[in-house]
């Protein structure tokens, strides 16, 4: 009987076991203890099925895509680990807050029970469909999709999965947000009513320069040089977040605790490089800001020892930075008082961008003022500016005809005299 040659160390093996199953074993690497990392596959169907599984493992090994040894993660366990231990220390606070909501509110209840390495694109697509059926907006489902895609990228780089199924899953389509600027008459009514409010320059900045809410509320006097007509956007106002100061004994949410403790800073750097920008301030707006500076100095004198010197341009009557939710409520009240259609605070920003484009300001300059990083943003305004430009052309045309009529009635001599 011929003795079978010994297989080389580390070679894959396929055999029929005494249990009636075909087995395959593949060496895919070395474990932490220095021993070979041998993976096992099996099938009762036949040798051919095991051969397929062995070849698949060998391919994963050769491509460096074999998942790490040990017990497989569930989607829930990985997402909770990722959001707290990987994302939280490395991303901006607002970014983490968005991830955390997507993970705990949507992903964990929706797909958390699956094994991480068994998650499929179809699982995610059915999950997005359920989100929409339960009342979530497409934008929310899309943000949730981006969150798990990011989390799975980290899992793949660490060898917990061999691929990112979220890159294959198709998220719901998002309808492009309609740009709804206010017209000139509405802007005038808003500014007239804003002049009756504290921090009235806040709304002039929104409608003239298009600063985002966080950018406007994050402005400090050190960022403004009215003599040179320059404003620097560097910081973004954060929504306050609190911890219990009572140890949780009050039974309320941290924000309502009488001993609450602020856990985040007032501001953070703007999110992108495009957001950090220098803007020229029109003379009229510069004068409004100087008037606002004098008014703030008067409030400082009235507050006396109660004044909190924060350096912010827009503050409460005692100097504290404005809370974004309070600012939003003021905007809604301003719209009602000015008898202007209801709209988002972001519509003030849309208005500023539209006016700049109508005035013929070069697109690259508009991008600088608005803090856009892509020309695609300007393209969204073309249908709006086109319609408004037609209206402006009609008005200008009417004015020309009125002048022509006057000239005609005055006769040739009048026409000659008017030149």
Image: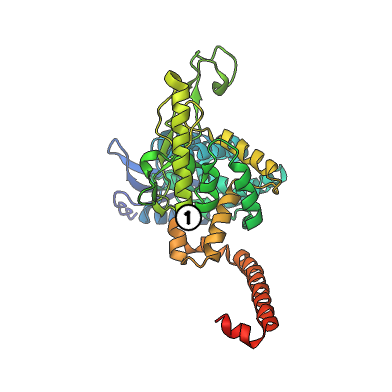
Residue at 33 percent of width and 54 percent of height: 4
Q: Residue at x 44, y 48 (%)?
A: 286
x then y, percent, for residue 93:
45, 37
Q: Secondary structure at mark 1?
A: helix
Question: Residue 133, position in %: x, y?
Answer: 72, 45
Residue 5 seen in render: yes
**Of the pair 216 and 36, the residue shown nearer to us:** 216
Name which residue lies at 51% across and 57% down.
Answer: 48
Q: Nearer the viewer, residue 81 or 231?
A: 231
Q: Residues within 10 Å of mark 1 (few under 14, many from 20)?
A: many
Frontmost residue, 1 versus 85: 85
Residue 57 coordinates in the image, percent (x, y) = 43, 52
Quadrant including the N terminus: bottom left
Residue that badge 1 annotates: 370
Question: Furthest residue to the left?
Answer: 34
Q: Going 41% across and 54% down the picture, which residue do you hit?
A: 280
Q: Residue furthest bottom?
A: 412
Quick check: 216 above or below 178?
Answer: above
- Where is residue 243 shown, x and y percent of the image? 49, 22
Residue 51 in sight in this render: no
Report the side of 153 relative to 344 (left or right). left
């Amino acid at each position: 009987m011929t003795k079978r040659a010994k297989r080389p160390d580390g070679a894959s093996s396929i055999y029929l076991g005494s249990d009636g199953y075909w087995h395959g074993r593949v060496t895919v690497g070395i474990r932490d203890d220095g021993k070979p990392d041998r993976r096992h596959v099996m099938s009762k169907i036949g040798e051919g099925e095991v051969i397929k599984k062995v070849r698949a493992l060998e391919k994963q090994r050769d491509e460096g895509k074999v998942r790490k040894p040990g017990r497989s993660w569930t989607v829930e366990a990985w997402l909770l680990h990722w959001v707290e231990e990987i994302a939280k220390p490395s991303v901006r606070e607002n970014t983490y807050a968005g991830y955390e909501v997507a993970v705990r509110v949507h992903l964990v209840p929706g797909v958390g029970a699956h094994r991480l390495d068994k998650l499929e694109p179809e699982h995610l697509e059915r999950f997005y469909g359920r989100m929409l059926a339960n009342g979530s907006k497409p934008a929310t489902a899309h943000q949730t999709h981006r969150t798990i895609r990011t989390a799975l990228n980290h899992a793949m780089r660490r060898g917990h999965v061999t691929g990112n199924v979220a890159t294959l899953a198709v998220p719901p389509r998002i309808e492009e947000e309609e740009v709804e600027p206010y017209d000139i008459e509405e802007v005038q009514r808003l500014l007239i009513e804003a002049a009756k409010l504290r921090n009235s320059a806040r709304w002039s900045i929104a409608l003239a320069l298009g600063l985002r809410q966080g950018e406007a509320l994050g402005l400090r006097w050190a960022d403004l040089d009215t003599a040179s007509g320059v404003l620097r956007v560097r910081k973004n106002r954060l929504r306050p977040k609190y911890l219990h100061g009572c140890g949780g004994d009050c039974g309320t949410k941290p924000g309502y605790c009488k001993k609450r403790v602020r856990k985040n800073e007032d501001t953070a750097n703007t999110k992108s490089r495009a957001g950090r920008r220098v803007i020229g301030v029109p003379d009229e707006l510069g004068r409004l800001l100087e008037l606002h500076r004098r008014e703030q100095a008067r409030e400082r004198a009235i507050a006396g020892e109660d004044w909190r010197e924060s350096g912010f341009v827009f503050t409460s009557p005692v100097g504290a930075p404005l809370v974004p939710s309070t600012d939003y409520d003021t905007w809604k009240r301003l719209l009602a008082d000015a008898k202007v259609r209801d709209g988002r605070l972001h519509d003030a920003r849309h208005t500023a961008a539209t006016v700049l484009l109508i005035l013929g300001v070069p697109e690259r300059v508009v991008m600088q003022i608005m803090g856009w990083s892509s020309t695609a943003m300007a393209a969204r305004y073309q249908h709006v500016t086109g319609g408004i430009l037609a209206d402006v052309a009609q008005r200008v045309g009417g004015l020309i005809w009125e002048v022509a009529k006057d000239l005609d009635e005055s006769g040739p001599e009048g026409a000659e005299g008017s030149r």
